Amino acid sequence: MEDLIALGEKYVMNTYKRLPKVFVKGSGAYIWDSEGNKYLDFVSGIAVNSLGHCPPEVTEAIKEQAEKLIHCSNLYWIEPQIKLAQKLVEESCCDKACFCNSGTEANEAAIKLARKWGQGRYEIITMEKSFHGRTLGSLTATGQEKYQKAFRPLPAGFKYVPFNDLEALEKALTPQTCAVMLECIQGEGGVNVPEPGYLQGVEKICRENNLLLIVDEVQTGLGRTGKPFAYQNFGISPDIITLAKALGGGVPIGAMLAKEEVAQAFEPGDHAATFGGNPLATQAALAAVSVLFDEEFLKEVTVKGEYLKGKLTELQKDFPQITKVKGIGLMVGCELSMDAASIVEYCLQQQVLINAVGGKILRFVPPLIVTEEEIDHVIEVLRQALLVRGTAD
């Protein structure tokens, strides 16, 4: 393993702070390193592997499609792309789909569509502690200075207001505002859940001021919260939805959905991606969403999410270092009074993968196929981690 890591350090650009593991195989909720050690994975490739590693439905779809047609370009109609667009539209409040390769690309598309629709209005209000990607437009939409400071000057036209603050949102509006962009649950910002009525209030402000409501569902969408899309937990109807992560079952693919009257703003040449919605990726995604949108499957996600939060809440009684348990479905945050990195490190040593966001928050985004027994194991390892590392600063 050390030789592989050394080779990576020599040839791979340093854009991630990588942990010293090389993973080579995965199945279900488990992943194996290059030395044969087995880990229980509650990171899921950062909320990508919602069906677990190498789900058979997806791997079979990839094999079959790879033998027929891998790529042909968007100069022509693509059968699995059409069927995937239909599936996503029928499960959502939107009417049209546009495909790309990642979440940040989907958000770039949403920004462009909102500005084109705005007919001269160009300002987009986003939330503090939000995360929308690392390309220049989506980075500017991201309400976190730490990601932006090295890349100034940033594009004009973005304002940031606190999440859960309707008054601040109203005060930020100008005649140039065309849209409000947010995550229903902030992921990278700390698994921040909206207060009751907040998202409905945001939608009301948008409707009263002729603004688009853009919902970034890259991390929250496709079953993660126990609904096909997280916005469906809150009774709102966004104008634009962005998707990626779980969409391809592990294969890179992103999508932007929009209502008809908004989608009409785009014309040929306004936005495109060579690989966006290619046959292989969309066939994999079709296989993934056929499971992720299943009603009984989604009910189980809700049940398991409540089980995980319940177990963390029980743990909180024994460990005052846990200050808050939050989340919806199987997108759960455990806020600590200490730095979370040492807990992540200890769990890694015990062959359990979790990660930290916002410095002091453990984020749990396990595969949606996770069992209660696997949750119990993670809780026990976390208990030991808090006993051993719980006094660390």
Image (tube, rainbow, N blue to C red):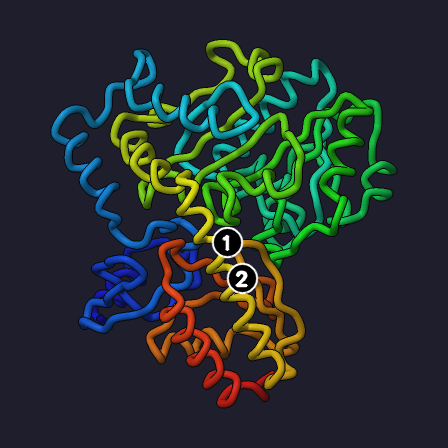
**Above or below 41: residue 13:** above
Tag 2: Cα neighbours inside 10 Å, few (<14), some, or many (≥20)?
Answer: some
Quadrant (top left, top right, bottom left, bottom right) of the C terminus: bottom right
Marks 1 and 2 close (CB-CB < 8 Å): yes
Q: Position of residue 289 (x, y in %)?
A: 37, 37
102 relative position to 120: left or right? left
For marks 1 and 2, give the CA distance: 6 Å
Task: Residue at 46%, 45% (x, y): give it.
Answer: 223
Disc 2 target residue: 306
Residue at the outermost left position: 67
61 relative position to 244: left or right? left
Residue in the foreground of this view, choosing between 202 and 311: 311
Task: Residue at 41%, 29% (x, y): give it.
Answer: 100
Q: Secondary structure at mark 2?
A: helix
**Above or below 9: residue 128:** above
What is the number of the mark on residue 302? Answer: 1
Q: Amino acid at mark 1?
A: Thr
**Above or below 255: residue 366:** below
Q: Amino acid at mark 2?
A: Glu
Q: Position of residue 350 (x, y in %)?
A: 35, 79
Tag 1: Cα neighbours inside 10 Å, few (<14), some, or many (≥20)?
Answer: many
139 relative position to 175: left or right? left
Task: Residue at 43%, 76% (x, y): give it.
Answer: 345
What is the number of the mark on residue 31? Answer: none
Q: Secondary structure at mark 1?
A: helix
